[in-house]
Image (spheres, rainbow, N blue to C red):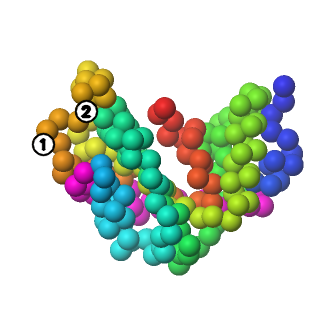
Amino acid sequence: MSGPSLSILRRLHRSLVYVSLDHLVGKRVQVRSVETALDDILEAVKEYVPIDVTTMDPGLHHRATAIAKYGILDVAYGIGSTALPEHRPGLAILRDLSLVDSNGDLDALETKRDFLHDLALESEAGQLYLKLFLETREKLQPEQASRQLRDGLPTGFWPHGFVVYDACLTNARSIWLAKHFYL
């Protein structure tokens, strides 16, 4: 087995857009409910990120499960336009996002090669995304997480505060699969 082909790496080098939005990290967001989470988050960040939102991730069940189990919200907004620069960082971003080994060697796993191929397809599709990764202000204890996953979030949980942990503008929706892996 070998690492990703040179053609996949060339495609990613030409097409991948990734702009880290560090100015959003640490921003506090009050979320009224799991149903309103996407609107609440967008309302809190739109003054800091000039974007024209076209779609919102509909994964309500996925969001509720991630909140109950891990205390996180991982959201994406499809955007039609932005005043932000669309930076093409080259292949160094693959190392920064743990998509290649930190020593620079490409991982020889078949799944990683397949993932980079899929990432190249996403980045060539022409869609931009605002991605935000938020955590609850209070860390959940493992025993609480398993109980909440089974029983649901406790009465009085909403509204609840979250903090932006990571944010980016990208044309590859699954760019954080290795960076924020929680499945």
Q: In the rendered image of this protein, does residue 51 appear above or below residue 162?
A: below
- Residue to which mark 1 is pinned: 156
Looking at the rendered structure, the kind of residue marked 1 is Gly
Q: Position of residue 159 (x, y in %)?
A: 18, 51
Q: Residues within 10 Å of mark 2 (few under 14, many from 20)?
A: some
Q: Position of residue 158 (x, y in %)?
A: 18, 48
> Is the residue under label 2 in contact with that under label 1 (CB below 8 Å)?
no
* Residue placed furthest toward the bottom: 83
- Asked if residue 171 lies left or right of residue 90, the reply is left
Q: Position of residue 63 (x, y in %)?
A: 38, 44
- Asked if residue 73 lies left or right of residue 13, the reply is left
Q: Residue at x 36, y 36 (%)?
A: 65
Nearest the camera: 97 or 123? 123
Tell me the element at label 1. Answer: loop
Q: In the rendered image of this protein, does residue 51 appear above or below residue 56?
A: below
Q: Quadrant of the N terminus?
A: top right
Q: Judge whether residue 15 is colored magenta.
A: yes
- Residue to which mark 2 is pinned: 152
Q: Residue at x 80, y 49 (%)?
A: 9
Q: Residue at x 70, y 61 (%)?
A: 125
Q: Can residue 141 be seen?
A: no
Residue 39 picture quarter: bottom left
C-alpha separation, residue under disc 1 versus residue under disc 2: 12 Å
Tell me the element at label 2. Answer: loop
Q: Residues within 10 Å of mark 1 (few under 14, many from 20)?
A: few
Which residues fall within the magenta stretch?
13-33
- Asked if residue 7 lies left or right of residue 181, the reply is right
Q: Position of residue 44 (x, y in %)?
A: 31, 65
Q: Residue at x 25, y 51 (%)?
A: 33
Looking at the rendered structure, the kind of residue marked 2 is Gly
Q: Can residue 146 be seen?
A: yes
Q: In the rendered image of this protein, does residue 179 appear above or below residue 133?
A: above
